[in-house]
Each structure stands twice: as C-alpha cells, then as structure tokens.
Image (cartoon, rainbow, N blue to C red):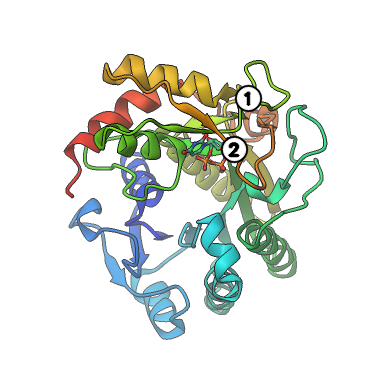
Amino acid sequence: MWLVTGGAGYIGAHVVRHLQRSGRQVAVIDDLSTGVRAKVDAAVPFVHASVGDRDAVRQAIRDLGVTGVLHLAAKKAVGESVERPLWYWQENVGCLQVLLEEMADAGVQRFVYTSSAAVYGQPDSTALITEDSACRPINPYGATKLAGEWMTSATAERFGWSAMSLRYFNVAGAGADDLCDPGVFNLIPIVFRALDSNERPKIFGSDYPTPDGTCVRDYVHVDDLADAHVQACAYVEANPGAGNTILNIGTGRGSSVREVLEIVSAVTGRDASGEAVARRAGDPAQLVAAVNRATEVLGWHSSRDVTDMVDSAWRAWQLKAE
Ligand code: UDP
C-alpha cells in the first residue's frame, strides 16, 4: 500500500490516479488546507489530517498496511515563504521529520519525496541544470525543499531505505477536466485569470539575456510528472536499500514567457500577447533541466508539449468550480 501525502492536491490527485492505473494500492493523507476531497476516488482510503499529526500518521501507516510513502504535502508559494519563513520550515521540514520518524518506527523503507527546481536558486549560467549543479536556494521555500532532501538522504542512509527525490521544474496542464490547478500562482493560470477579467497578461521582464528577452522555463505536463512518480515507485520497489536518488523532472526544453503566451492565444482564441513590465525579483533568466538521469534511472521521459499543457489546463480551467 502506497500512502500519498497531499493526495487531494493538484499534483497529488494526478499521482493517485496514475498509481491506481498502475495497479497499485493507494491511500491518501491530506489536511485539505488546499486539497479537495472530491478529487480523490471515494474508494481510496482517505485520512483527513496533517502530516505533522503524529498519531494520525502512525495510525494510518499501521491500519492501512503502508509499505511506501509518496510525500507531496507541502507549502509551495515562494512569496508566502518569504512572508512566513518559520511556518514554511514547520510545514515543509517539521512535518517531514514527523513522517520520517513514524516511517522508521514502523519499518516502512520506500519513500518518494517532492522536491523542486527551487533548490538551484539563481544559476550562474544558462546551461542545462544537472542534478550536480550547485544548490543555492534564494528563498525559504527552496531552502525547505533542499533541507527535506538532506533529511531524506540521511534517513535513507541510516535505515537502509530506497528513496527518490524528484526535483519538479514548472508543472502545468491537467490530466482530466476535474483536475484543474486551483491555485493561481503560476504563469499559465495567472494568464487564464487575466483573460477572464479582460486584462492583459503581464510579462515580468523583457530584457533578459534570452532569445526574445523573456525568461525561459522548462514546463512539464502534470501527467508526465505523475508517470515519473509511478516509475519512481517501481524503482524503489525493485531496488531496496538504494539510498536517496535525486532526479530532475522536466522536459529538457525551454519555453520563453512570450512563447507560452503565443500558445495560450492559439489555444484559447483570445489575445494573450501581454505587456512587458518590470522584472520580478529573484527570477533567473533561464531554468531548464538536464533530464538524462531520469531517463537512465527510470526509463522515463516526458511525452507532452506546452500546447498539450495549455490545452488541457484551459479545458479544466473553464470547468472549474468558482
Ligand atoms: N511570469 C510572468 N508573468 C506572470 C507570472 C509569471 O511573466 O504573471 C513569468 C515569471 O517571471 C517566470 C515564468 O513566468 O519567468 C514562470 O513563472 P512561475 O511563477 O509560473 O514559475 P517559477 O519559474 O517562478 O517557479
């Protein structure tokens, strides 16, 4: 039985469905602070609690016969993490400590951890980012994700676990019309909201050293990301005691803000061309993953492009409950 923390969230709900389709048994623990119960199949055992609730975690592991955990539950808004750093450390690191302790106590030895490209901070060059690139987070969110990787490595080492830390790049899209990203924190949903309110999307900076002057990111479809989680489970199942393996999860291809806006215009039939405004603090010019390690270790690679992401996200966006 795989326990998915944060399984009622945007990404977690996709991961749960993909795990079900892979034939695995799956259960969810989610505090529903941002997650939505209805996104999870009623047949999936569901524990409504925080991962920091030690008794609930202990009981869930024991009663559900948990043999592996995918830990997606976390806070992920960069700006909020700057405003409330200690809360981010509590939620993303304090809760992880409780989870790892309870797993160790119960002898659960398989772990998949959600990390982020935010661990890299502001890279010195525009080269593809490998897993060995320097990790210098520039905000509390990225710092907590990196600390979580360290805790995972140390715990996996100490107790002979097989763990995997997946550093997500820019996740977008929807795998089903009811799995819209409800948080309007990232470029594509922000642009959709602007279109809905007849505002021009804002381009944060058009004087970057990139081909069209706007920032370049590696957008990865949430369904590809969910597939990577299934492969990660298969890997840790097949390789006991392997320690913590760190993998970038992206496509290896960059898209500029302007390119994304052009795709949004094409998909929605509306003018999403946007207006250039000042740079946003802390944005690197380019952040694109080297993805060969994920392919070597998991046999995984992305198969969906930015048009697929915008198209699926737009359909889900239009159907989302207000
Ligand atoms: N961005 C933008 N306008 C917006 C929101 C985002 O130009 O209204 C840019 C942002 O500067 C970055 C890219 O879009 O270059 C992706 O931003 P997002 O916040 O989605 O993810 P990040 O890469 O910061 O994690």
Asked whether residue 59 appears in the rendered view, the answer is yes
Image x and y of residue 208, in percent: 69, 27
Quarter of the rendering containing residue 32: bottom left
Q: Are marks 2 and 1 in contact (CB under 8 Å)?
A: no
From mark 2 to mark 1, how far is it between C-alphas?
Answer: 27 Å
Q: Residues within 10 Å of mark 1 (few under 14, many from 20)?
A: many
Residue plotted at (36% across, 49% down): 10
Image x and y of residue 213, in percent: 64, 22
Location of residue 303 with respect to 247 vertically, above or below: above
Q: Residues within 10 Å of mark 2 (few under 14, many from 20)?
A: few
Q: Amino acid at mark 2?
A: Ala
Quarter of the rendering containing residue 289: top right
The residue that disc 2 covers is: 278
Q: What SS does tag 2 mark?
A: loop
Disc 2: residue Cβ within 8 A of ligand 1's nearest atom: no
Q: Amino acid at mark 1?
A: Gly
Which residue occupies the foreground of this view, 139 or 225? 139
Image x and y of residue 301, in percent: 55, 26
Location of residue 62 with respect to 207 vertically, above or below: below
Which residue occupies the foreground of this view, 52 or 218? 218
Asked whether residue 109 appears in the rendered view, the answer is no
Quarter of the rendering containing residue 108: bottom right
Image x and y of residue 234, in percent: 52, 43
Residue plotted at (51% across, 21% down): 258
The residue that disc 1 covers is: 252
Location of residue 253 with respect to 298 vertically, above or below: above
Earlier along the polypeptide chain: callout 2 or callout 1?
Answer: 1
